[in-house]
Image: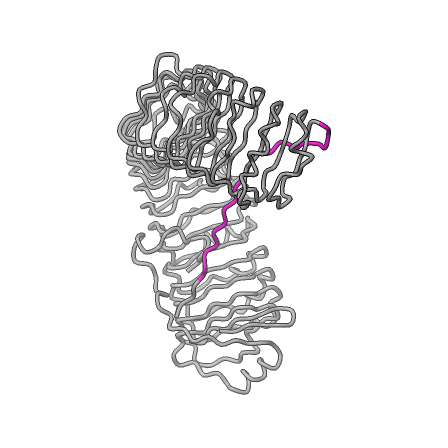
């Protein structure tokens, strides 16, 4: 395989596999209020402090102190105890300091309104925190806290409590009695059960986050009458009672064990319910404000009845279900931009009576044998169309402009005659075209003249014996995949202005001149598994004199056409073969 040093670096594969190390980055985001350098405000965030300056410790008038993102926990002395004289503090930020404990009695801080302890190594809460009757916001995310104090009743002013990314197993029942609480974030803990909520529980609570816990069975949140945002995704809930929550705007229930979901629906804007066993979603009121709906990876045989009346919908993800048909009205939703129906059992689409403004349509892995005759007329705004891995033998005739279409994915069908496709290409500005694993034996005349804007073309896994020399007309072509055909000869690519990737593996090429196929910007050339191929050593040495070349010996394992969905997981866009 080969690599270039001067302006470009090229890789040529002559005859396995590659590895990519995954990048895993984690960013801890802590909301830190900006603090100005005034007599009653001190901001010392990110100073690598291991001790607290004396002028801070002696400033008894100090009201706002930000010591976040330092190293106070590295000191052998309990330096945080030096803050005990600052009794007038209203805001204190000790986040990200490697603190294992906080030797302060917060009873000494009666005026404290905001306390941030996130991103430390705390296993328990400091004394006195639950006595702070003026405390409005308490943030203690990203610690190791396993248990909480039982009595929270004194925190009568608390509006926001965030304890995400800890080791909590249970929630004290008194938290639900906090009548000013608006935000409760318990995301990523180990909570397995929530006791029945008392009457009038957290009457002002608007946002509740319980995702990534260990909840199972039933969860009844009927008492949270003002709840607007709820996230219980990534648990094991089999039943969720939220049908009386009239103010619910966003609901996230992904990756649970739900079979049915009952909603009030009148204010709902976002519903993400993928990865359950859902068969039905019932809304008491039409969700007229619903904008995003994700019901993918479920057991739906029919789309919810109300879906065609939800006129605000602009994104519908219903892929990986058991759908055998879709209502015609869904294509009349005036705001619908993105529709995903891939990995279902659809045999045909309904007849189109009107045009719609959809920009993205995913229909791969269904059972289509043909499309409606006016398919492209009905979708004039379409930018991305994925019809891969169906049973299409041809495309409908198109006499209408599809100038917005940029990505057309047709791999894994039974296409052989591309005449109608050429007419379509002339009316579009296709940049990415996938035709891999069809039954194409030859490319029709004028095929490449219609591809002025083409950047990526995959024709792998067909029965092509030659490629027309007119391919040079595709001046913008950057990636060309031709592996697993029956190519004997290769046209010249040396004049191609933008070609970067050329995959000719698994063909029947027996002789070629490297100089004729190596474009000036080529960075990757695969000639592997052309078993009779003979490369003139002089040509290769000449190429090495012009560019830095690295040769990699590969065995071409796994380069055959996929036999089933199970061994090709959503690689249609990122991996053309």
What predominant SS class does the magenta segment belong to? Answer: loop
Q: Quadrant of the C terminus?
A: bottom left
Q: Residue furthest top?
A: 199
Q: Residue furthest front?
A: 77
Q: Is residue 563 left or right of residue 544?
A: left
The colour scheme of the drawn protein is one colour
Please name the residue shown 59% across and 44% down the image: 50
Please name the residue shown 29% across and 38% down the image: 322
Q: Which residue is nearer to you in this view: 250 or 349?
A: 250
Q: Is residue 58 left or right of residue 114?
A: right
Q: Which residue is nearer to you in this view: 139 or 496?
A: 139
On the question of residue 246 being in view, the answer is no
Please name the residue shown 31% across and 32% down the image: 192
> Where residue 56 appears, x then y in whole percent?
66, 33
Quadrant in the picture for residue 166: top left
Vertical position of residue 559 compared to residue 146: above or below: below
Region of the chain picked out in magenta, as a range = 20-39
Vertical position of residue 193 compared to residue 48: above or below: above
Vertical position of residue 553 compared to residue 418: above or below: below
Residue 184 shown in magenta: no
> Where residue 465 appears, x then y in whole percent?
42, 70
Quadrant in the picture for residue 507: bottom left
Q: Which residue is nearer to you in this view: 22 or 128?
A: 128
């Amino acid at each position: 395989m080969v690599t270039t040093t001067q302006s470009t670096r090229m890789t040529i594969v002559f005859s396995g596999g590659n590895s990519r190390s995954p990048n895993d980055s984690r960013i801890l985001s802590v909301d830190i209020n900006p603090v100005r350098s005034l007599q009653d405000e001190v901001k010392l965030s990110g100073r690598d402090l291991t001790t607290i300056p004396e002028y801070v410790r002696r400033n008894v008038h100090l009201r706002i102190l930000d010591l976040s993102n330092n190293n106070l926990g590295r000191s052998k002395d309990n330096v945080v105890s030096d803050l005990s004289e600052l009794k007038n503090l209203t805001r204190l930020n000790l986040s990200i300091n490697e603190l294992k404990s906080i030797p302060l009695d917060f009873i000494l801080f009666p005026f404290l309104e905001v306390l941030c302890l996130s991103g430390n190594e705390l296993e328990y809460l400091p004394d006195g925190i639950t006595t702070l009757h003026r405390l409005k916001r308490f943030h203690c995310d990203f610690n190791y806290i396993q248990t909480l104090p039982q009595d929270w009743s004194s925190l009568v002013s608390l509006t926001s409590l965030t304890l995400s990314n800890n080791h909590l197993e249970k929630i004290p029942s008194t938290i639900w009695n906090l009548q000013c609480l608006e935000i409760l974030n318990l995301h990523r803990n180990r909570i397995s059960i929530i006791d029945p909520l008392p009457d009038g529980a957290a009457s002002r609570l608007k946002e509740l986050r319980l995702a990534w816990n260990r909840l199972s069975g039933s969860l009844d949140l009927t008492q949270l009458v003002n709840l607007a945002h709820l996230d219980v995704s990534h648990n094991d809930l089999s039943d969720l009672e939220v049908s009386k929550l009239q103010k619910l705007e966003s609901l996230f229930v992904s990756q649970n064990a739900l079979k049915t979901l009952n909603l009030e629906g009148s204010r709902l804007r976002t519903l993400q319910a993928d990865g359950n066993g859902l068969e039905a979603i019932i809304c008491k009121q039409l969700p007229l404000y619903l904008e995003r709906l994700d019901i993918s990876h479920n057991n739906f045989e029919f789309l919810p009845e109300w879906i065609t009346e939800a006129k605000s919908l602009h994104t519908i993800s219903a892929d990986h279900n058991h759908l055998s048909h879709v209502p015609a009205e869904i294509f009349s939703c005036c705001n619908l931009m993105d529709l995903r129906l891939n990995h279902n059992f659809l045999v045909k689409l309904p007849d189109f009576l009107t045009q719609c403004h959809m920009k993205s349509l995913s229909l791969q892995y269904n059972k289509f044998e043909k499309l409606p005759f006016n398919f492209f007329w009905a979708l004039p705004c379409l930018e991305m169309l994925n019809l891969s891995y169906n049973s299409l033998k041809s495309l409908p005739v198109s006499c209408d402009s599809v100038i917005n279409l940029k990505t057309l994915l047709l791999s894994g069908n039974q296409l052989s005659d591309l005449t109608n496709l050429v007419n379509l290409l002339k009316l579009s500005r296709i940049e990415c075209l996938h035709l891999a694993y069809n039954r194409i034996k030859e490319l029709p005349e004028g095929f490449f003249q219609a591809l002025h804007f083409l950047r990526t073309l995959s024709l792998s896994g067909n029965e092509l014996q030659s490629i027309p020399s007119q391919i040079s007309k595709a001046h913008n072509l950057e990636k060309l995949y031709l592996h697993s055909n029956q190519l004997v000869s290769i046209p010249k690519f040396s004049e191609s202005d933008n070609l970067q990737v050329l995959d000719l593996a698994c063909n029947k090429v027996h002789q070629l001149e490297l100089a004729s196929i190596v474009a000036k910007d080529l960075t990757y050339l695969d000639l592997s598994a052309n078993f009779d191929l003979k490369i003139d050593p002089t040509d290769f040495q000449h190429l090495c004199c012009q560019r830095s070349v690295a040769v990699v010996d590969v065995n071409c394992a796994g380069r055959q056409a996929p036999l089933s969905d199970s061994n090709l997981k959503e690689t249609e866009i990122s991996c053309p073969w």
